Image (cartoon, rainbow, N blue to C red):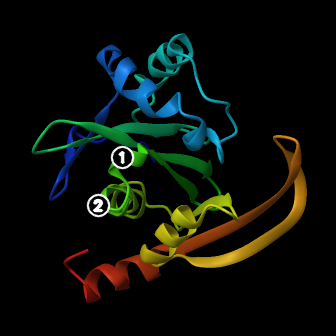
Amino acid sequence: MAVRPDYPLITQRLLLRPFTRGDVDAVFAYRGREDVARYLFDQPLSRDECALAIQQRTSQTGLAEEGDRMVLAVETLDQGDLVGEVSLIWRSVEARQGELGWIFHPSFHGRGYATEATNALLDLGFGPADLHRIYARCDARNDGSWRLMERLGMRREAHFRQHALFKGEWDEEFYYAILRDEWLARRHAEPSL
């Protein structure tokens, strides 16, 4: 399987596209924030660190082998605002599994953008990428993330309690997943997703 979409991916209100060097300030506007970094492995990024991250992401646009990732900028169609990013990582060739991720600027929370953008990546993962299972994970305290997973039709498969030290304290993590057949049945039953 090799997947490199014809960009941009367009949804009802959003455009998903590869990152460009011109995105550094928009990404720094959310990745430089303490409240955004709270549940991420990174600390808040400096502008220089954002520039380096963008440089790496410009080539993360397709899946050709296990471990590859697509990390896409999410921009509004009406205003052209870069509101966040979504990712799909090819985790296992043999088991045909991927991992879904997202980071959005808090100013754009509550508008359904994360749901709309991740739906597009699930369509890609279960369509052209022919994945069997896609999972996502988050800190158990990150209500917004696990609620998004539930809106996507994912089921909670695990709750790891105090399984790792994360930023100086014991981490609790939720794992959610959805199978290809479940996603396709959901899309068929609710075409407006």
Residue at 56%, 17% in the rendered image: 46
Q: Nearer the viewer, residue 81 or 130?
A: 81
Q: Give the percent coordinates (x, y) of residue 49.
A: 56, 16
The residue positioned farthest toward the top in the image shown: 48
What amino acid is labelled 1 in the image? Ser
Q: In the picture, which quadrant includes the C terminus?
A: bottom left
- In the picture, measured across the screen, residue 56 lies left or right of residue 93, that is left
- Residue where numbered disc 1 is placed: 107
What is the secondary structure assignment of the residue under circle 1? helix
Q: Which residue is mark 2?
A: 111
Left or right, residue 178 beside residue 44: left
Q: Which mark is in front, 1 or 2?
A: 1
**Residue at 65% from the left image edge and 58% from the top image edge:** 138
Q: Is residue 117 visible?
A: yes
Amino acid at pointer 2: Arg
> Residue at (75%, 74%) from the top-left corner?
158
24 on left or right of 116: right
Image x and y of residue 129, in percent = 41, 54
Say which of 28 and 155 sits in front: 28
Within-10-Å neighbours for mark 2: few <14, some 14–19, many 20+? few
Residue 42, image quadrant: top right
Image vertical order of residue 37 relative to residue 147, above or below: above
Can you see residue 134?
Answer: no
Q: Specify whether 158 is left or right of 97.
A: right
| In front of the other: 171 or 155 | 171
